[in-house]
Amino acid sequence: MAPFVIRPAYLCCVLRTGRLLSLHRTGNTFYSGRSYSTEEDKKVPKIYTKTGDKGFSSTFTGERRPKEDHIFEALGNTDELSSAIGLAREFCLDKGHTFTDQLDKIQCILQDVGSNIATPRSSARESHMKRTNFTAQPITDLETWIDSFTKELPPLTNFILPSGGKSSATLHLARTVCRRAERSVAPIVRSGEADPNVAKFLNRLSDYLFTLARYASMKEGNEEKIYKRSE
Protein backbone atom coordinates (compact mmCIF):
# COMPACT_ATOMS: atom_id res chain seq x y z
CA MET A 1 0.00 0.00 0.00
CA ALA A 2 1.30 3.45 -0.87
CA PRO A 3 1.88 5.82 2.05
CA PHE A 4 -0.44 8.78 2.40
CA VAL A 5 0.08 12.23 3.86
CA ILE A 6 -2.21 13.30 6.66
CA ARG A 7 -2.07 16.09 9.21
CA PRO A 8 -3.01 15.29 12.81
CA ALA A 9 -6.14 17.42 12.55
CA TYR A 10 -7.23 15.41 9.54
CA LEU A 11 -7.73 12.27 11.58
CA CYS A 12 -11.44 13.03 11.50
CA CYS A 13 -11.41 11.71 7.95
CA VAL A 14 -11.25 8.17 9.30
CA LEU A 15 -13.82 8.68 12.05
CA ARG A 16 -16.62 7.29 9.87
CA THR A 17 -14.99 3.88 10.14
CA GLY A 18 -15.73 3.83 13.87
CA ARG A 19 -12.07 3.42 14.75
CA LEU A 20 -8.80 5.25 14.27
CA LEU A 21 -6.11 3.74 12.13
CA SER A 22 -2.97 2.62 13.93
CA LEU A 23 -0.33 4.97 12.62
CA HIS A 24 3.16 6.10 13.43
CA ARG A 25 4.79 9.19 12.11
CA THR A 26 7.94 9.37 10.03
CA GLY A 27 8.80 12.92 9.01
CA ASN A 28 5.66 14.51 7.53
CA THR A 29 4.13 11.24 6.40
CA PHE A 30 2.06 8.72 8.28
CA TYR A 31 2.48 5.04 7.49
CA SER A 32 0.50 2.04 8.59
CA GLY A 33 2.32 0.29 11.39
CA ARG A 34 1.53 -3.24 10.21
CA SER A 35 3.78 -5.38 8.06
CA TYR A 36 2.91 -6.18 4.44
CA SER A 37 5.21 -9.15 4.16
CA THR A 38 2.60 -11.80 3.31
CA GLU A 39 0.19 -12.19 0.42
CA GLU A 40 -2.69 -11.92 2.87
CA ASP A 41 -1.40 -8.58 4.07
CA LYS A 42 -1.10 -7.28 0.52
CA LYS A 43 -4.84 -7.45 -0.06
CA VAL A 44 -6.44 -4.06 -0.69
CA PRO A 45 -8.33 -2.99 2.48
CA LYS A 46 -12.10 -2.58 2.11
CA ILE A 47 -13.50 0.94 2.25
CA TYR A 48 -16.51 -0.26 4.23
CA THR A 49 -16.31 -1.45 7.85
CA LYS A 50 -20.02 -1.93 8.70
CA THR A 51 -19.50 -0.15 12.05
CA GLY A 52 -22.17 2.41 11.14
CA ASP A 53 -24.81 -0.04 9.98
CA LYS A 54 -26.90 0.48 13.13
CA GLY A 55 -27.06 4.24 12.65
CA PHE A 56 -24.26 5.28 14.98
CA SER A 57 -20.84 6.81 14.34
CA SER A 58 -17.85 7.91 16.42
CA THR A 59 -16.46 11.28 17.30
CA PHE A 60 -12.71 11.84 17.51
CA THR A 61 -12.99 11.45 21.29
CA GLY A 62 -14.44 7.95 20.88
CA GLU A 63 -18.08 8.68 21.65
CA ARG A 64 -20.69 6.69 19.76
CA ARG A 65 -23.53 8.97 18.72
CA PRO A 66 -26.53 8.56 16.41
CA LYS A 67 -25.80 9.72 12.88
CA GLU A 68 -28.48 12.40 13.11
CA ASP A 69 -26.60 14.02 16.01
CA HIS A 70 -25.88 17.72 15.51
CA ILE A 71 -22.14 16.95 15.40
CA PHE A 72 -22.49 14.75 12.32
CA GLU A 73 -24.99 17.13 10.74
CA ALA A 74 -22.38 19.89 10.97
CA LEU A 75 -19.64 17.59 9.69
CA GLY A 76 -21.78 16.65 6.70
CA ASN A 77 -22.44 20.27 5.89
CA THR A 78 -18.77 21.23 6.01
CA ASP A 79 -17.94 18.24 3.82
CA GLU A 80 -20.59 19.32 1.32
CA LEU A 81 -19.16 22.84 1.44
CA SER A 82 -15.70 21.56 0.55
CA SER A 83 -17.20 19.63 -2.36
CA ALA A 84 -19.05 22.71 -3.59
CA ILE A 85 -15.84 24.73 -3.43
CA GLY A 86 -14.05 21.94 -5.27
CA LEU A 87 -16.59 22.13 -8.08
CA ALA A 88 -16.28 25.91 -8.30
CA ARG A 89 -12.51 25.59 -8.32
CA GLU A 90 -12.63 23.37 -11.41
CA PHE A 91 -14.62 25.99 -13.33
CA CYS A 92 -12.23 28.69 -12.12
CA LEU A 93 -9.25 26.66 -13.28
CA ASP A 94 -10.82 26.32 -16.72
CA LYS A 95 -10.95 30.11 -16.91
CA GLY A 96 -7.36 30.55 -15.73
CA HIS A 97 -8.15 32.40 -12.53
CA THR A 98 -5.13 32.96 -10.29
CA PHE A 99 -6.98 32.71 -6.97
CA THR A 100 -7.51 28.95 -7.06
CA ASP A 101 -4.61 28.42 -4.65
CA GLN A 102 -6.75 30.22 -2.07
CA LEU A 103 -9.56 27.73 -2.67
CA ASP A 104 -7.07 24.89 -2.22
CA LYS A 105 -6.05 26.30 1.15
CA ILE A 106 -9.66 26.80 2.21
CA GLN A 107 -10.53 23.18 1.44
CA CYS A 108 -7.65 22.09 3.68
CA ILE A 109 -8.79 24.45 6.44
CA LEU A 110 -12.28 22.96 6.23
CA GLN A 111 -10.70 19.64 7.18
CA ASP A 112 -9.40 21.38 10.30
CA VAL A 113 -12.87 22.80 10.91
CA GLY A 114 -14.29 19.28 10.75
CA SER A 115 -11.66 17.99 13.15
CA ASN A 116 -12.57 20.62 15.71
CA ILE A 117 -16.29 19.92 15.36
CA ALA A 118 -15.65 16.17 15.70
CA THR A 119 -13.91 16.76 19.04
CA PRO A 120 -16.63 17.77 21.53
CA ARG A 121 -14.94 19.44 24.47
CA SER A 122 -17.15 17.70 27.02
CA SER A 123 -15.43 14.39 26.27
CA ALA A 124 -12.06 15.60 24.93
CA ARG A 125 -8.75 14.98 26.61
CA GLU A 126 -5.92 17.49 26.43
CA SER A 127 -4.25 15.45 23.69
CA HIS A 128 -7.44 15.65 21.61
CA MET A 129 -7.64 19.41 22.09
CA LYS A 130 -4.05 19.93 20.99
CA ARG A 131 -4.53 17.91 17.80
CA THR A 132 -7.70 19.69 16.75
CA ASN A 133 -7.03 23.25 17.91
CA PHE A 134 -8.37 25.88 15.52
CA THR A 135 -6.73 29.33 15.48
CA ALA A 136 -7.87 32.75 14.28
CA GLN A 137 -5.24 33.01 11.52
CA PRO A 138 -7.47 31.61 8.74
CA ILE A 139 -10.04 34.30 9.57
CA THR A 140 -7.40 37.01 9.18
CA ASP A 141 -6.36 35.51 5.84
CA LEU A 142 -9.94 35.60 4.55
CA GLU A 143 -10.35 39.23 5.58
CA THR A 144 -7.12 40.14 3.78
CA TRP A 145 -8.30 38.41 0.59
CA ILE A 146 -11.75 40.00 0.79
CA ASP A 147 -10.28 43.49 1.15
CA SER A 148 -7.92 42.88 -1.78
CA PHE A 149 -10.69 41.75 -4.16
CA THR A 150 -13.12 44.45 -2.99
CA LYS A 151 -10.67 47.19 -4.01
CA GLU A 152 -10.93 46.00 -7.62
CA LEU A 153 -14.72 45.61 -7.71
CA PRO A 154 -17.26 48.27 -8.60
CA PRO A 155 -19.42 49.41 -5.67
CA LEU A 156 -22.37 47.16 -4.91
CA THR A 157 -25.48 49.30 -5.42
CA ASN A 158 -28.12 46.62 -6.09
CA PHE A 159 -29.03 43.15 -4.92
CA ILE A 160 -27.51 40.64 -7.31
CA LEU A 161 -28.66 37.13 -8.15
CA PRO A 162 -26.34 34.11 -8.45
CA SER A 163 -25.09 34.56 -12.00
CA GLY A 164 -22.10 35.91 -13.92
CA GLY A 165 -20.90 32.72 -15.59
CA LYS A 166 -20.17 29.21 -14.36
CA SER A 167 -17.28 30.20 -12.10
CA SER A 168 -19.33 32.89 -10.41
CA ALA A 169 -22.55 30.86 -10.16
CA THR A 170 -20.83 27.87 -8.55
CA LEU A 171 -19.05 30.15 -6.09
CA HIS A 172 -22.47 31.54 -5.15
CA LEU A 173 -23.69 27.98 -4.69
CA ALA A 174 -20.76 27.29 -2.37
CA ARG A 175 -21.66 30.47 -0.47
CA THR A 176 -25.17 29.18 0.25
CA VAL A 177 -23.82 25.83 1.45
CA CYS A 178 -21.41 27.76 3.65
CA ARG A 179 -24.32 29.59 5.26
CA ARG A 180 -25.98 26.28 6.05
CA ALA A 181 -22.76 24.93 7.52
CA GLU A 182 -22.49 28.03 9.68
CA ARG A 183 -26.06 27.60 10.93
CA SER A 184 -25.41 24.00 11.91
CA VAL A 185 -22.17 24.87 13.70
CA ALA A 186 -23.59 27.83 15.65
CA PRO A 187 -25.40 25.78 18.36
CA ILE A 188 -22.36 23.56 18.83
CA VAL A 189 -20.18 26.60 19.45
CA ARG A 190 -22.77 28.18 21.77
CA SER A 191 -22.84 25.00 23.85
CA GLY A 192 -19.07 25.24 24.29
CA GLU A 193 -18.37 22.03 22.37
CA ALA A 194 -16.39 23.68 19.53
CA ASP A 195 -14.00 26.59 19.16
CA PRO A 196 -15.72 29.97 18.51
CA ASN A 197 -13.17 30.62 15.74
CA VAL A 198 -14.81 27.83 13.72
CA ALA A 199 -18.09 29.75 13.53
CA LYS A 200 -16.25 33.00 12.80
CA PHE A 201 -14.32 31.35 9.98
CA LEU A 202 -17.48 30.05 8.31
CA ASN A 203 -19.15 33.43 8.68
CA ARG A 204 -16.21 35.15 7.01
CA LEU A 205 -15.93 32.43 4.39
CA SER A 206 -19.42 33.13 3.06
CA ASP A 207 -18.43 36.80 2.64
CA TYR A 208 -15.28 35.71 0.84
CA LEU A 209 -17.18 33.43 -1.54
CA PHE A 210 -19.67 36.20 -2.34
CA THR A 211 -16.86 38.64 -3.06
CA LEU A 212 -14.95 36.07 -5.09
CA ALA A 213 -18.04 35.26 -7.17
CA ARG A 214 -18.34 38.93 -8.13
CA TYR A 215 -14.62 39.11 -8.85
CA ALA A 216 -14.72 36.04 -11.09
CA SER A 217 -17.66 37.48 -13.02
CA MET A 218 -15.82 40.76 -13.53
CA LYS A 219 -12.60 39.09 -14.65
CA GLU A 220 -14.47 36.95 -17.17
CA GLY A 221 -16.36 39.95 -18.51
CA ASN A 222 -19.74 38.49 -17.58
CA GLU A 223 -22.74 40.50 -16.47
CA GLU A 224 -24.26 39.91 -13.04
CA LYS A 225 -28.04 39.63 -12.95
CA ILE A 226 -29.61 42.43 -10.91
CA TYR A 227 -32.63 41.79 -8.70
CA LYS A 228 -35.80 43.39 -10.00
CA ARG A 229 -39.03 43.40 -8.07
CA SER A 230 -41.77 41.39 -9.75
CA GLU A 231 -44.67 43.47 -10.97
Image (tube, rainbow, N blue to C red):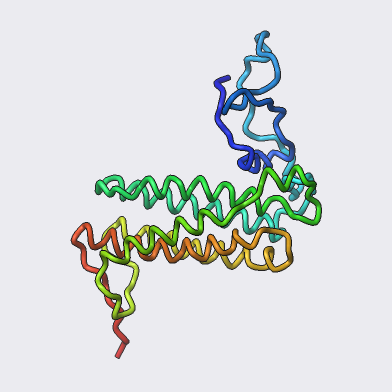
Q: Nearer the viewer, residue 121 or 164?
A: 121
Q: Nearer the viewer, residue 198 or 188?
A: 198
The outermost residue toward the top is: 38
The outermost residue toward the left is: 221
Say which quadrant the C terminus sits in. Answer: bottom left
Residue at x 61% of width, y 27% of height: 30
Q: Quadrant of residue 11?
A: top right
> Where residue 43 sits in the image (x, y, percent)?
63, 17
Q: Is residue 223 above or below residue 26?
A: below
Residue 70 appears left or right of 168: right
Q: Is residue 70 above or below residue 129?
A: below
Residue at x 65% of width, y 43% of height: 12
Residue at x 69% of width, y 38% of height: 17
Residue at x 67% of width, y 64% of height: 189
> Where residue 109 sits in the image (x, y, percent)?
53, 49
> Where residue 120 sits in the image (x, y, percent)?
74, 54
Q: Nearer the viewer, residue 88 or 207?
A: 207
Residue 83 appears left or right of 75: left
Say which quadrant the N terminus sits in. Answer: top right
> Where residue 163 sits in the image (x, y, percent)?
30, 66
Q: Is residue 75 above or below residue 20?
A: below
